[in-house]
Amino acid sequence: MTASTDTPVPAKLALSDGTVVTGESIGHRGLAGGELCFNTSMTGYQEIMTDPSYVGQLMMMTYPHIGNYAATFDHDEADAPMVAGFIVRQFTRRPSNPQADETLDAYMRRHELVGISGVDTRMLVRHIRDKGVMNAVISSEELDDEVLVQKAKDWPSMDGLDLASEIGVNEPTTFCEGDGPTIVVYDYGVKRNILRSFRQRGCTVHVVPGSTPVDDAMAYDPDGIFLSNGPGDPRAMPDAIERTSRLIETGRPLFGICLGHQLLSLAQGFDVYKMFVGHRGANHPVQNLDTGKVEVTTQNHGFAVDPDTIDEAKARITHVNLNDDTVEGMRFKTFAGLSLQYHPEASPGPHDSQYLFDEFMSMIAAERNIEIAPPPESRSPVNA
């Protein structure tokens, strides 16, 4: 692992409202654009960069020092970074981590990921909180302010954009085989740690493209069906919503996380809205209304379920966000199913919410009348 000694290259970040800041290029030289968002996690930048739910977004880290522990191959949540660009306050070019495989700068260059450092991320975060999320561009090539602002204005809005169909597996694949239940995962951008969480519980996991017909999924004779996380606006996915309705009709237990949570809600006739500022970080407090306990959760979403549209005859809210009362979890009443807006696989972040995978296992055991091994003692599936 060799530290970068390149001469600094100027770069600019331009927002669609006319705000422009100057910094230093990191990673790949070029231009990138997307919806500007921020993540409040102190660690886990590589997992964040490779989270498929971030497709089409410029990621800004609020923690000021990024790159300290470089990059390690087995920390990826996907085969390559999914963020459109990367923004930091201070970038570490001389990391300290004997387990690292390469510097973060080298990692970004290898994957042609454009980034900028040396900008006032605190000011920019406050700006977004006041004005709402907006599109932006990063450039280390074109540096004219007016040109860059116009490019940001012209960038396609995330609102009404179907991005989930662009990622995920192209062909069915078996992630693992075990002695436990068989799970079919509809892949709209599934994180690897979700798959590891099922593997840790002894499941056989078949991952199928998000466009897979219901009959093809049922050919695996699954004990449960999982609808994954993913990017974009779920309202722009009418085929996926209709397919989810058909999956409900199969009678198999269903579990949805993030985008999957929203698709289950839309299939039940509930509404989803785009948030003024999304939730992205590893420190969001969520209360379990059944137990009263508060979980510190990992979150990444820019859309949420409208609580005023939830039919109490069809579902009940099980989890709420204590910061803004948004819906974070539901149990369905007309079929065996649960859904979560946040990420219980918890990487990066704590392990407060791993029990929800166990609840899905219990639901499968009851509905399918099968015995399932007790939950694992370890709550960290990363090394499972």
Image (tube, rainbow, N blue to C red):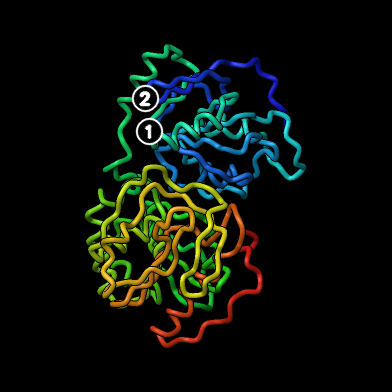
Viewed as shown, does residue 51 lie left or right of 164? right
Mark 2 falls on what kind of element? loop
Q: Is residue 25 above or below residue 325?
A: above
Amino acid type of the residue tagged 2 in the rendering: Asp
Amino acid type of the residue tagged 1 in the rendering: Met
Residue hosting label 2:
17
Determine if residue 259 is in view: yes
Q: Are marks 2 and 1 in contact (CB under 8 Å)?
A: yes
Q: Position of residue 191 (x, y in %)?
A: 49, 54
Q: Residues within 10 Å of mark 1 (few under 14, many from 20)?
A: many
Q: Decide which of tag 2 and tag 1 comes sooner along the chain.
A: 2
Residue hosting label 1:
134
Front one among 318 and 22:
318
Q: Position of residue 383 (x, y in %)?
A: 65, 60
Viewed as shown, does residue 362 lie left or right of 222? right
Front one among 182 and 35:
35
Mark 1 falls on what kind of element? strand
Q: Residue at x 44, y 34 (%)?
A: 128
Determine if residue 225 is in view: no
Q: Residue at x 44, y 62 (%)?
A: 320
